Amino acid sequence: MDYDNMMLDGESLGPTVKISAADSTHVDFELTNVDLSFANSLRRVIQAEVPTIAIDLVEVEVNTSVLADEFVAHRLGLIPLDSREIDQLNYTRDCDCENSCGKCTVQLTLHAKCTSDEVMKVYARDLIVGIDRPNNHIGNPVITDPDGLGSLICKLRKGQEIKLNCIAKKGIAKEHAKWSPTAAVGFEYDPHNKLHHLDLWYETDAATEWPKSKYADWEEPPAEGEPFDFNAVPSRFYFEVEGAGNIEPDAIIQEGIKELQKKLAGLIHGLGENDGMNGDYDGPRSPDAMDGGVGWQDQGYTTPYGNAGNASAWGGGAATAYGTTPYGNSGGGW
Amino acid sequence: MAGKTRARAAEAEEVDQADITMEDAPPSAQKPGYSQEEGSAMQEDEGEENDVAGEEEEEEEEEEEEEEPQRVRILPGSTETAASFEFLKEGHTLGNALRYIIMKNPGVEFCAYTIPHPSEDKMNLRIQTYDTTTATAALAKGLQDIEDLCDVVADEFWTQRDKFNAAQNK
């Protein structure tokens, strides 16, 4: 851990975290002495790239409820399933198995039939979780209500029946929001808008018309007549992470950072493998030194002076101080 | 492609001969009916004459060339100290943080990123360095720096979490 604190903004203190509130579904914390770009990366990664498990495939055997099969399947997908220790589960695409197995999926079955005159409600607790899974909590429907019911899946009237088999898979929210570990992530900085990153609309006075952030007391308000500091950068970030229940909120942050590091490690690995590739290629090009974007090739018009384009008495298309120009294709290395 | 390239080189020679009489004339004035390609080939040829050493280095690079799908690629036209990298399956999450941390490297003159088109899962990163380092080295250092920063933040978060929990249970 040889991270150089001198690299950071602020008083080279290094990043600090202050947790202001936490419970089983929330964590509110302040992250200081990091750059906006890093804080935002953290927010993005915990919202979209932390893996969880959710129902992905539904085989409907019987569905005589009023809801269409795909409607029920969609509702099933959105039920949060326990995703703690998700590392023990493979992505189905990476798994050695043919279609699905206990190492990459969790099976859930649901069978409900209404026989009484009253409307029957089918809840997430009625899902029966298969035993072939890496540990005995992964894939369990998340049940947090005092009655222990879980999410409502559908309602059945007398004689209606629903029987289906679900396959839950590991995934990330970038693919589908059902895999999101978070319900919401609050991200805030500069409550007094000292940096002018916001342009607040107002009738007569922005300060009185806009409600104060709860973090406004945490930071000095701007002094009367204080000049705008155009060099200032944000350094205090207020996160309010609200979990969906499938992973504990503190673990979401931890997993998020881990996921970011996995991304980096993969790239460091890929970079070591192959980094010379200046070959023939018709796609986008690196802008070449000094080329100014245009001018090396005939621009499609000439002047009667025979001196069109960029070529001039200064040496036509000859090399610049930066060496040969890579445009066009010589037989050489480019 | 290689065949095409060779043909162009031959044309370039032809152009070069023409150049004996029309030294500094632009491609458009060389001979009527010259195409753009030929014109540029000539320019390339002149470049070679003037910078033989640079060309040798670039040939070495071509030998390493490998056509495999890879996460990071240097876009053609890059030099040691000024390179553009194309990242597949990356976006603002990595791009902006990487841009920031590479810019913090004192050996780096310029660093910026772009997502050229929103429906392509690609992120391009441009790095220009001073002579003290290379673009690839700056990128590798940048990646390592964020990884170290992540370690620090993860550690800090976890110690603060433990502290918070301890305070709550009192």
Image (cartoon, coloured by chain):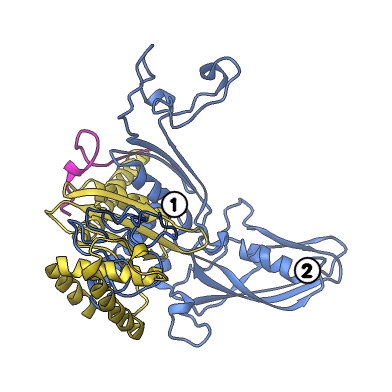
Q: Quadrant of residue B167?
A: top left
User: Label 2 belongs to which residue?
Assistant: A68
Q: Residue at x 49, y 56 (%)?
A: A181
Disc 1 residue type? Arg
Question: Mark 1 belongs to which subunit?
Answer: A
- Chain with yellow colouring: B
**Which span is picked out in magenta?**
A1-22
- Sequence-first disc among 1 and 2: 1
Q: Helix, strand or loop at disc 1?
A: helix
Seen at 79% across and 73% down, the residue is A161
Q: Which chain is blue?
A: A
- Left or right placement of residue A124 versus residue A69 in this view: left
Above or below, B161 against A58 in this view is above
Is A13 colored magenta in this rendering? yes
**Amino acid at circle 2:** Ala
Mark 2 burial class by Cα count in 10 Å: few <14, some 14-19, many 20+: few
Query: Badge 1: how crowded within 10 Å, few (<14), some, or many (20+)?
Result: some
Residue A121 seen in the figure: yes
Give the residue at mark 1: A44
Q: Return the x and y of residue A218 as percentages of the image width and height.
A: 38, 26
Indicate the position of residue A235 as horizontal and vertical percent values.
Answer: 32, 35
Q: Give the quarter of the image for residue A256.
A: bottom left
Vertical arrangement, residue A130 with respect to residue B104, above or below: below
